[in-house]
Image (cartoon, coloured by chain):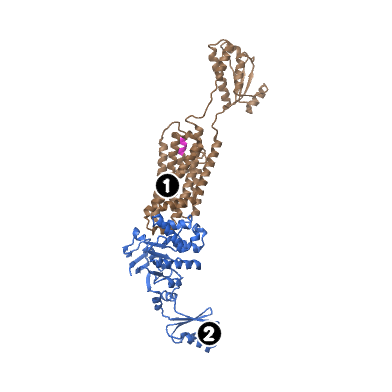
Amino acid sequence: MTVFKAYLKVLNKNKALVILYTVLLIFFASFNMKTNSVGTFVAEKPNVLIVNQDENRGITKSLIQYITQNSTIVRVKENDSSINDALFYRDVSYIIYLPHHFRNDFLSGKNPKIEVKSTGDYNASLASMMLERYLKVATTYREVEKDEASLVKMIEETLDHQVDIEMTSKLDSNQLMKARDFYNFSNYSLLAGCVFVICFIVASFKDENIRKRTMVSSLDMKKYNQQLLFANGLFALTLWFLYVLLSFILVGKSILDFHGLLFLFNSFVFMVVALTFGLLIGNLVQNKEAIGGIVNVVALGSSFLCGAFVPMEWLPDFVLKIAHIFPSYYYISNNHFISSLEYFELSWSFVMNIGMLLLFGVLFILITNIISKRK
Amino acid sequence: MKKVIEVKSLTKEYKGLRAVDDLSFDVYSGEILGLLGPNGSGKSTTINCLLSLLKFQTGSIQIFGKSMSPTAYEIKKQIGVVFQEVAVFQELTVRENIEYFCGLYIKNKKMRNEYVEEAIQLVGLEEFKKFYPKQLSGGLLRRLNIACGIAHKPKLIFLDEPTVAVDPQSRNHILDGIKRLRNEGATIIYTTHYMEEVEILCDRVIILDKGKIIASGTPDELKELAKIEEKVSVEIEKISTEKLEEMKRFKNVDDVKYIDGILVVTYQKGKNNLIHLIDYLKKENLQYNKIYSERPTLNDVFLELTGKELRD
């Protein structure tokens, strides 16, 4: 295992590169996670204006109280001009006009018409849902309870039920987005880390003079190449494992299900491709100064074009068409697919993408072999 | 003496150009064989063929009585090579480098450690064990290069210009080390551009030119091949062309040259040539400073045989 041990020593001298790419991954992944969102749910409170033309008592008072509790009541002069201005400038999202005799009409079994004005946005929809909810509950209880005080009590008891929401469902889309972003970014770290380090070490071992010295030694060249390949494979596997571990630390246990397994499998296949690509470049380029440039062009370029840093859906069509020539495209596409899954399912496109990644790997191995034989 | 290497009718062509042309020679156990020749004479090609780094068209190479091939690992175990270019890992320390290259041959860790320490001692790198190659001077780097090639105690060692661009202290260290290796029983094939090293070290010399052996023998035998027997050099400020022509007509004189204030008179044979020359200079009232006589060197032989200086 002389070659393997020497590989580890040379790797140790290049450990700064591995640390650099890991730190980059942690930094960008953490940054993405912070900007994405948080893990708690806070109910939205829409801005509502209530124009009450009825007496403020009984069921009318109860309705106003309910809306007030669950929204932010905006005070505006009750003339058309001021109300329209408030709506136009979105100081208020929803305006409820409670008509004269609303209470009496409702209690007598009629369905008094409540006029509303709305900005039509998300907050307005929330306010609308609130109003509808109250009226539905009130209408239902009205059929069984004729006494106003009891009716109001029943309505309020029903509507008072609070639900604590904890985001621990199996399809936690927020966490899945984080995982997707992490694995997308790991495209760059894994590719750059593998290619950079493998190229640097292979360049040392394949240095013409060192190779000549090895060839005249009594070590079987097949065993020598096997040891080098094993060491490179072990390095790539360790890097991959480190990043997988990081993903579980940063994203959390919520991906400890089939999503996590699929992310793991997809990134493992990509790691194999990165390894074969590293070996190819290592055999092509012996100049250590040139390796840095090549890694930046290939790893950074393909990561940008394939959506590792920017979501794929934001990229123009022509960029995505170009991205098809890079393995990263298929890896990132699969990450998107995995993050959208509600239940375990292997679609044809997922399998095809894995197939494409493996094809790239085989292609890189073939080219490496041809180059090695020519040398 | 036992033959270590037996080369018969070795021919190597590159695209129709014969780099090595029907070469045959033997190397004997325990000797230091100097392989000399101007650039492009076929020295490196011959060595690369011997080491199976290059395929050749015709001929045969036997090392330790067995046919040499890229997979002749039993033979390779007993060979050590020090290439002209320094071949070490920049990422490994002096000791780690020697241990790595020794480890390609020696699997036993204890034995390997002993060998590594001995190699470090042989080249005098005890104080630099933990240094990285980029921290070493050119001379120390060459010493490391040698240690990497010989740490596994090979019986046959190829040394390709190991003292190129080396300071005098390191050169002495290297030459002493080579002598020690020979004394320990190693057979050495040595190529160099420095004639004085050949004269000090080599038991036998082969001179190559255009892929062929043009002369071989011990350094003294080669010197016998030279037409000249004595060379007298005189530091003299001025001398006329007529005087030079007159001296050329002296008995036994082969040639007379006056270059950069030095008059060089070469004699084919004869006795008392120096005395005769001094008498002439006195008689002609020619003022001179230093005057010295020397036997022809290997460089003169080389020049005569190839028409080129060794460093050409």
Q: Amino acid at mark 1?
A: Gly
Q: Is residue A335 magenta?
A: yes
Q: Chain of mark 1?
A: A
Structural distance between the alpha carbons of marks 1 and 2: 79 Å
Query: Which colour denotes chain B?
Result: blue
Q: Which mark is residue A87?
A: none
> Mark 1 vs mark 2: same chain?
no
Residue B110 is left or right of residue B139, and the answer is left
| Chain letter tied to brown | A
Residue assigned mark 1: A233
Q: Residue furthest bottom?
A: B283
Q: How many numbered marks are there?
A: 2
Magenta segment range? Answer: A333-338
Crowding at dot 2, Cα within 10 Å, few <14 / some 14-19 / many 20+, comes out as few
Q: Amino acid at mark 2?
A: Ser
State the image quarter where residue A139 is shown.
top right
Residue assigned mark 2: B240
Residue A291, position in %: x, y?
49, 52
Crowding at dot 1, Cα within 10 Å, few <14 / some 14-19 / many 20+, comes out as some
Q: Image point 55% across, 85% down: which residue?
A: B287
